[in-house]
Amino acid sequence: MSAEPQFFDKPGGFVGKPIVRVEGREKVTGRAKYSAEFPLPGLTYGVLATSTIAKGKIMSIETAAATREPGVIAVLTHQNLPKLAKTPNTPEGKKDTGSQMGFMPLTSDEIFYAAQPVALVVADTLEHAMHAATLVKITYQKAAPIASFHDPKAELFDPQKIQDGKADGHIRRGDAKGAFASSAIQLTATYNHPVYNHNPMEPGSTTAVWDAPDRLTVYESTQGVTRTQSTLSAMLGLPREQVRVITKYLGGGFGCKGSMWPHTILTVQAAKAVGRPVKLMLTRPQMFTSMGHREDQTQTVQLGATADGKITSIVHTKTSTTSPWDNYAESNAKILDMLYATPNFEATYQLARANVMTSTFMRAPGEAPGSFAIECSMDDLAYKIGVDPIEIRLRNYADHDYSTGKPWSSKSLKQCYARGAELFGWSKRNPKPGATRDGRFLVGMGMATASYPVHNSQGTARARLYADGHAVVQSGATDLGTGTYTVMTQVAADSLGLPLEKVRFELGDTQLPTAPNSGGSVAAGTVSSSVYLAAQDVWQKLIKMAIVDKKSPLYKAKAEDVAVEKGRLFLKKDPKKGEAFGDLMKRADITDIEGMAQGKYGSGYEAASAAANADPAHKDEAAQHAMHSFGAHFCEVRVDMDLGTIRVSKWVSVMGAGRILNAQTARSQIIGGAIFGIGSALMEETVRDQNFSRYTNADLAGYHVPVNADIPNITVEFVDEHDPFINAMGVKGIGEISMVGVAAAVGNAVFHATGKRLRDLPLTPDKVLMSGVNS
Amino acid sequence: MNNFAYTQAASTKEATAAKAADKQAAFIGGGTALIDLMKSNIEQHSLLIDINKLSMLGIENAATGLRIGALERMSDVGEHPLVVQNYPVISQSLLASASPQLRNMASMGGNLLQRTRCGYFRDTAFPCNKRQPGSGCPALVGDNRTLAILGGSASCIATHASDLAVALVALEARLTLESPKGTTRTVPLADFYKLPGATPNIENHLQPGELITAITVPAAAHARKSHYLKVRDRASYAYALVSAAVGLDVQGGTIRSARVALGGVGTVPWRVLAVEKYLVGKPATEENFRAAAALAVRDAKPYEHNKFKLELAQRTIVRALLEVV
Ligand SMILES: Cc1cc2nc3c(=O)[nH]c(=O)nc-3n(C[C@H](O)[C@H](O)[C@H](O)COP(=O)(O)OP(=O)(O)OC[C@H]3O[C@@H](n4cnc5c(N)ncnc54)[C@H](O)[C@@H]3O)c2cc1C
Ligand code: SF4
């Protein structure tokens, strides 16, 4: 492996092209195996029975009726489940296991949240297990639960740190309160957000097989096989290499599959207990209470500005609900801190413990709600001083990162504004709110800025090139369904000078070289860099072979004088002198050759040693540059002035996100994020009953995600952006920025349409109506 | 879901007899409502009597109007030219329901017997008077945004979920019912449903073993000029927050007859006779529609989260009426 950072430069190849998914055929023909689809001999089925109360104690469990049912193999409860080597129930246990939730169900008789698992039934068929699970009779001693921070009984506290101490709960730059108090313009606004659930199409599922008493294979629906492996090995007290985790295909994750949740280890324990493989797939209702959610929260933004609209200060507070054990809150403040040229900034968090499971990262955690707050407030500021929403953003354009004082590694935001406005037809917008009508519809146009950070990350890949002209390239990454297989095949093909169909890319297995979680938008940049560098490692080895091979035209050349293109090694100064790698390898009588490399992303690439030594919470800051992708969303809505319904009628997103690996899968990511964000703006909401602390709409009939009829044609463009600081491929992630600012663009369009500012998501017809439209 | 037996009935007689013989038995049409309820353990049935082989079919002009066999699928009825032309409100109510896949499977009879979407009813961990008589109604002081403002009681305020039923009630449709004895009777759909009162678990006047075999709808000028408007949280595939089924016969600018029913606001499909009465004899103007619509919610009792329905119901009626003048 070369010590120098190398940078991918292979124009005209497959990278960037709209290549269709290499695994598409597997998927549409049903041959792609998801984690609950491995037909193993002796497979049994696990079904969870869950708590009907949200707080209290189990007084008795009656399992006899369930056990008697035909086909039932075991009914496991806290009384008879094999003990774990380590649970996350203590702060140390939580740290060692890397669990998102500091609590493991079925370790005691206590109930902390509604639908907490209380028993696991294993049977020979799914139907037997489902039925038997309903026969487990439990009596509880009930206590009154606390449902959220809104609950009058809830106690608010200042957590100091959020995300298990990984993020600061206080941010202070300058004198934000003082500057706000003395600002010519002072805007204060409060934003409310409901609980959201990720609801990937594929529910969480686990198939656990004990290959030997101390050797385990798990087919898992996870965004990161490595993290799951490490959690399992800690909980089970097994060496990591005795735990294998496989995820060949994933039906979405959005963050809920980013860490390991209780159902996985319970399935593993059940497999141990019954001595057979066990498969468990969560039901859709269980998906609302098994893999985290985005927490219910309220944010207040105080925005101070000069009379001509230059921000002087932002004061941000967030109050949200957390579980009985963990201090988890999305860090909304980060984006408010860096998005504009804000000289004074302050942010604080407040939490309240309630009888809910621990919330977790969900697509653009922090940035999604945070951008709603800042981008609606910026819109308010634009109207307040009477300038165009784009103009107010340009007046406050951050030419460097005010939150760190560092220069940007690259930033194409101005181009995004300009190109987005052009594609959208922004110039046709009547600046006056509530003034554009089409029959009974009020028409509005809104926009918002998007940004997402480049998080420090690293991973490894292996490339094996065969003399016959094909290659197998591997990295233990995950394809969430978004195109990892495809883009890595493209990168490998270009890096190895092979046609696409001669490259097989393998992922999703802990036996492969380690890759990071597919989360935080790090996967594309990290894995592509690893793949590219692994190919470079192959070439370096071949060059070394050639220059000592008497029969090679490159014999006795210096390694640094040799270049490679399309699989041919040649002298830079005399390109005619050279040979194809196949000829070299055949002469040496080797069938294949392997390269390995570690790819780094973000600060790890730019400032590798500083990042390596930084404390985990501050690794991103080790870089000399501030690293972010940026973009702009433009939205047109039609609001029915009588009925209060909002329909998005036009959408444009323009992004500057470094090198785009595949024009088609990238476009799909941005479309997906826009739809995700429109859902969060207009309809998604998990409703928690305030007396029972239990959800009342935990299924896809009650929890509305957008359907086709809700979504117009979406126009996506990427701005050409070259960033040599972020990784060897110059790639920034796009999975999350795609939804940052989306809800704000919708909200801003609704304001422009109606003249009513709605700050409580989602913007359902009742809220529009009650705001006084057409009254 | 519990274990159950399955049988396919060869005749209506066989079907009704099997049902009469087993109190825990259920007919299964498309199964789109029933199987959900069984999977969620809301209903337990010992025996499913498959009625899909029965000849309760046909979408045709009968002596007094339209006759639809109870086994016709929602999609077939919704797209049938006879229905589209002469009873647009029925077609529209069907095509605004559920999803194409569900409509291809779901039967007319089954649609009318679907059960409420009240979230407390749908999760057996909650108390619910409708599911478990006497256990209480958490919706009264809980999440009642989608629940009823009309026809509720201290026991239950669950909304009736069917769109079709709203259209049919507006057009004074009748059900043909066949008993285990082989006798048939017809009942107005409006009288078929029962208000919750103190027994929200009993939702209609179906007698033990009775089978819905057909639906009849009288032909009328107001049926030809009819419209279904459904307001919901997303553009498609969602139950109504509020819906209105309306029909008008306007001659020379004056309303000769009017039909107005509301969905999403009542514990049963809610015909508003006062609105109809107000409209008849008056000019078909927006002003009159507004004045009439105000009468629709005179007796409404809203709860914490569904107050908006008072306003939305009126606006939905007005907008729907404007569609048919
Ligand atoms: C996700 C989802 C969304 C939906 N959205 C809507 C919507 O927007 N609007 C709407 O109106 N509906 C909606 N529905 C409900 C749907 O219309 C019903 O599920 C369907 O109409 C039921 O018909 P079925 O034939 O499948 O009934 P089944 O499930 O077979 O039966 C339902 C009930 O009727 C009984 N039954 C069936 N046929 C007869 C008969 N001939 N005589 C006596 N009893 C009988 C059964 O025993 C059972 O109790 C939705 C359903 C789902 C699952
Ligand atoms: S409204 Fe009716 S269905 Fe809903 S909880 Fe109350 S009793 Fe049950």
Image (tube, helix red, strand yellow):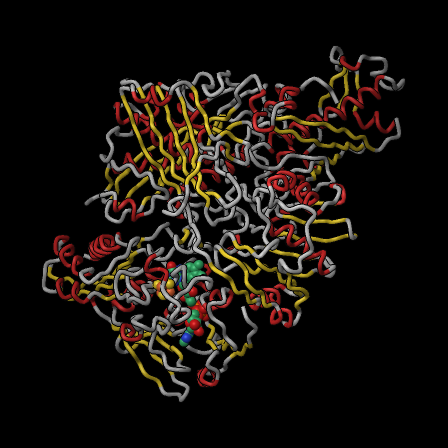
- Name above or below for residue B200 compared with residue A99: below
Say if residue A525 shows up in the picture.
Answer: yes
In the visual, does B6 lie left or right of B239?
Answer: right
Q: Position of residue B10 (x, y in %)?
A: 50, 82
Q: Which quadrant of the picture is home to ligand 1?
A: bottom left
Residue B320, percent across and down?
23, 56
User: How many numbered discs, if any?
Assistant: 0
Give the farthest residue toward the bottom.
B181
Q: Position of residue A264 (x, y in %)?
A: 63, 50
State whether residue B209 is above or below residue A390. below
Q: Quadrant of the N terminus of chain A?
A: top right
Among the 4 quarters of the image, the one containing residue B300: bottom left
The residue closer to the viewer here, B181 or A582, is B181
Identify the residue at horizontal 64%, vertical 34% (top origin): A516
Q: Is residue B160 above or below residue A418?
A: below
Q: Quadrant of the C terminus of chain A?
A: top left
Q: Is residue B61 visible?
A: no
Give the camera-side residue of A564 and A188.
A188
Q: Quadrant of residue A80?
A: bottom right
Quarter of the image for residue B160 reads bottom left
In the rendered view, tell whether residue A494 sits above or below residue B16: above
Give the camera-side residue of A244 and A539.
A244
Give the side of residue A474 with respect to residue B178, left or right. right
Q: Residue at x 38, y 61 (%)?
A: B118
Q: Residue A753 location, x and y as percent?
A: 27, 37
